[in-house]
Image (cartoon, helix red, strand yellow):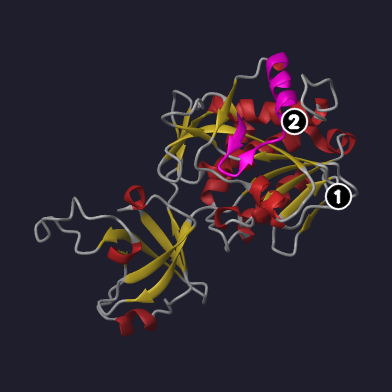
Amino acid sequence: MERLLGILRKLESIPSPSGMTGEAIAFLEETAAEAGLASSLTNKGGLLAGCLEEPELMVAGHVDTLGAMVSGIRPDGSLSFSCIGSPLLPSFEAEYATVFTSTGATFRGTLLLDNPAVHVNREAGTIERKPENMHLRPDVEAKTRKDVEALGIGTGDFICFDPRYEVTDTGFVKSRFLDDKAGCAAMADAMLSLGPGGVDAGRVCFYFTNFEEVGHGASAGIPPTVRRMLVVDMGVVGEKVDGIETAVSICVKDSRGPYDFGMRNRLVELARDGGIPFRLDVFPFYSSDGGAALAAGHDVRVALVGPGVSASHGMERTHVKGLKATRDLIAAYVKGRDGSSTGGGVA
């Protein structure tokens, strides 16, 4: 688990909102090279690693995260913003952030409600949190829009929130953006464990996508020979779902519809045979790279697994047991997906 957690810690330290994922992709490219695997970039900047010549199975997860972008500078020098993806703004309020400017300079700041001081605003605790009444307070000595513009800050600059990564002595992993850096870490660790022999024998290609949070991550870049797609993304934890942080979730249906029945049954069979803790689950308000691929017209069978993640799109949490279970199920499927299935089609 030390290697998996090391990969996750590094990924969490690299800001990578949709549209600014180059550094995170470069790290995963280095990781693939350490495993002795070939890799290539898609035109959109995603990473393919492993069997690049006629892969049959694709294991896909997204390295892009939620974030924001400067949408304007206000007269007082504070920054208006537009969300990247759908961060849960009440959870992100008061979070520290870094503004990445087009010139390469960076500035720190804090996401706040407009007029946030309770000593002058009695409604501060009840106002709805939304971009229209929130701002980023930059940590610069500037009182006007002109002052801020002179620093090189402007519309289009990325705003990256601090992840606050922490592993507790009870095995919990707390951080923003575990969706889906936890899944990517499990994928990368499985990739390292399998090595060239296991990857080539399974005709498997690992695909780290970079636009899932905005809806089109795996809509392109899938090699034409791929027939099965195992998506690795966060498992939902909350009311009226069955996922838990200490297990791998196998999603049977999300808001776009059911996943492949045969692949699902094979995953269940492998988890049971391998003693891997798992939960079958329906995710009511959820979409994935698998849905994007299918909507784009790719003729692939799709299944989805991932570690249980609490408080999705907010201050998230999972557990080392869930990460290990996900890593182990990925490896088991790569090595044993051609075994017998309990029904429902080709696994």
Q: Position of residue 346 (x, y in %)?
A: 82, 30
For disc 1, the marked residue is 52
Q: Is residue 70 left or right of residue 257?
A: left
> Under tag 2, what secondary structure?
helix
**Total of numbered circles in the picture?**
2
Q: Pick the quarter of the image with the N terminus.
A: top right
Residue plotted at (75% across, 38% down): 191
Query: Residue 5: where, in percent of width, then height?
Result: 58, 35
Q: Position of residue 242 (x, y in %)?
A: 50, 25
As rendered, which of 105 and 238 lies closer to the eye? 238
Figure check: 198 above or below 50: above
Judge whether residue 151 is colored magenta: no
Distance from the alpha carbon under mark 1 to that under mark 2: 22 Å
Which of these two is toward me, 255 or 84? 255
For the C terminus, the quadrant is top right
Residue 135 to residue 146: above or below: above
Magenta span: 250-273
Q: Secondary structure at mark 1?
A: loop
Label at residue 65? none
On whether residue 254 falls in the magenta region, the answer is: yes
Quadrant hosting residue 267: top right
The spot of residue 253 in percent (x, y) is 60, 35
Determine which residue is flagged by label 2. 263
Q: Name the residue type under label 1.
A: Leu
Instruction: Tell me if residue 2 comes above or below residue 89 in the rendering.
Output: above
Q: Residue at x 51, y 77 (%)?
A: 103
Mark closer to the chain start, 1 or 2: 1
